[in-house]
Amino acid sequence: MKKKNIAIILSGGVGKRFKKKIPKQLYKLNNKTIIEITLEKFVQTGFFEKIIIVSNKKIINETKKISGGKKIQIISGGKTRQESVLKGLKEAKRYNPKNVIIHDVVRPFFSKKLLDKILKKLSTKDCVIPIQKISDSVRYFKNNSYIDVNRENLNLIQTPQGFNFQKIFNAYKKLKKNHTDDSIIAYNNGIKISVIDGERMNFKITDKKDYELAKQIWKENKHMDIVKIGHGFDVHALKPEKDLIILGIKIPFSKGLEGHSDADVGIHALVDAILGALGMGDIGEHFPPSDVKWKNKSSKYFLEYTKDLLLKKKYKINNIDITLICEKPKLTKYKKNMKKSIAKILNIHSEKINVKATTTEKLGFLGREEGIACQSSVCITKND
């Protein structure tokens, strides 16, 4: 299916209603420009052989900087929307597509599901348009006229819009009059229109009020972009005449864990999980065992350091899941205190922490009681 589809993203506007020198597609939502957000969604679907951005000449260099990739092609647009679409269609013809999707760059809140519906329907239709029925009352208001308008058959037209490539291309080659969207051009050239339900969130950022609404939506749905998960694993050998410390709790036992620091296998795995979620390497990079200053150091220090990294990067912990693996000692009765210990260091509620203990059914070095292992997972999100 992918090789039959080309996307044309229209980015030729200069945002006159913003009354700013910067075009609205270069405004940012959560540190990403609107054009980046829209483009990333198209790329991530995997539906398209090529994505053509039709850019305003004034911002074509900025567009090239943020729009790399083999699938992406950038061309300059025309003076009107229709001229830009035609230039995009001429470029798309080189790839001999069956279908073309045309989309306004400043509609960043469309979903992959909507694109999928359009492309599936194009397997049997020549033109597929998302629409939204008008639910508010409609009035014609000018000068002293205030006239009720029947909204029953009125609809809002959205992009992305899907077309049989050759048919919409032929329609554009005949075009003599400007229109506000592509579906009316298709209709005026005898192409049958098929409609699907649009999406309420798929609004067009036209003026500053729209932009403020977009920022609020993005803020309230941050988790879409900033949920991160990390995984950590550690293992230490058991050694006589050493204290056994796991997850910050000293446990009565005839052996302890061997290591450069206090060898707290639980905290080490947890630190690695958090560092993994942050994309900041592993515990050995931050606290190399070759450095004598970490000799016999309490692993609580390592976890406090990692907590500070979380705060610095403005992330918070959603939940932690820890699995301790050993034959002996039996750890079940210590789990509650372990949770309290970790919660105190990280300054989070103990309900966000889960500690499990299991064995390897006497298999392997853990089954022979030669060591203790731990694996940990953590989920973090951006903290307002």
Image (cartoon, rainbow, N blue to C red):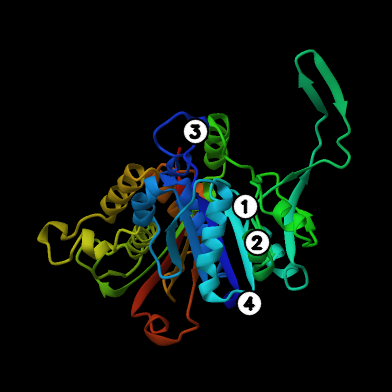
Residue 75, picture quadrant: bottom left
Of 364 and 274, nearer the camera is 274
Q: Quadrant of the C terminus?
A: top left
Left/right of residue 5 with respect to residue 355 in the rendered view = right
Question: From this viewpoint, which residue is outermost toward the bottom?
Answer: 363
Q: Earlier in the sequence, mark 1 or mark 3?
A: 3
Instruction: Write down the residue under mark 1.
Output: 110
Residue 281, picture quadrant: bottom left
Q: How many marks?
A: 4
374 to 87, vertically: above or below: below
Q: Which amino acid does label 2 sit on?
A: Leu
Q: What residue type is labelled 1?
A: Phe
Location of residue 142 in the rendering, given as x and y in whole percent from the top left corner = 75, 19
Residue in the picture at 27% in, 62% down? 283
Q: What element carries label 2?
A: helix
Between circles 4 and 3, the one closer to the viewer is 3
Location of residue 199 in the rendering, given as x and y in whole percent from the top left corner = 70, 49
> Alpha-carbon distance for marks 4 and 3?
38 Å
Q: Which amino acid does label 3 sit on?
A: Lys
Between circles 3 and 2, the one closer to the viewer is 3
The reply to whether discs 1 and 2 touch (Cβ–Cβ < 8 Å) is: yes
325 to 139, vertically: above or below: below
Instruction: Write down the residue under mark 3.
Output: 16
Location of residue 351 in the rendering, given as x and y in whole percent from the top left corner = 54, 48
Q: Residues within 10 Å of mark 2 (few under 14, many from 20)?
A: some
Q: Which of marks 1 and 2 is nearer the N terminus?
A: 1
Instruction: Write down the residue under mark 2.
Output: 115
Instruction: Write down the residue under mark 4.
Output: 1
Between circles 1 and 3, the one closer to the viewer is 3
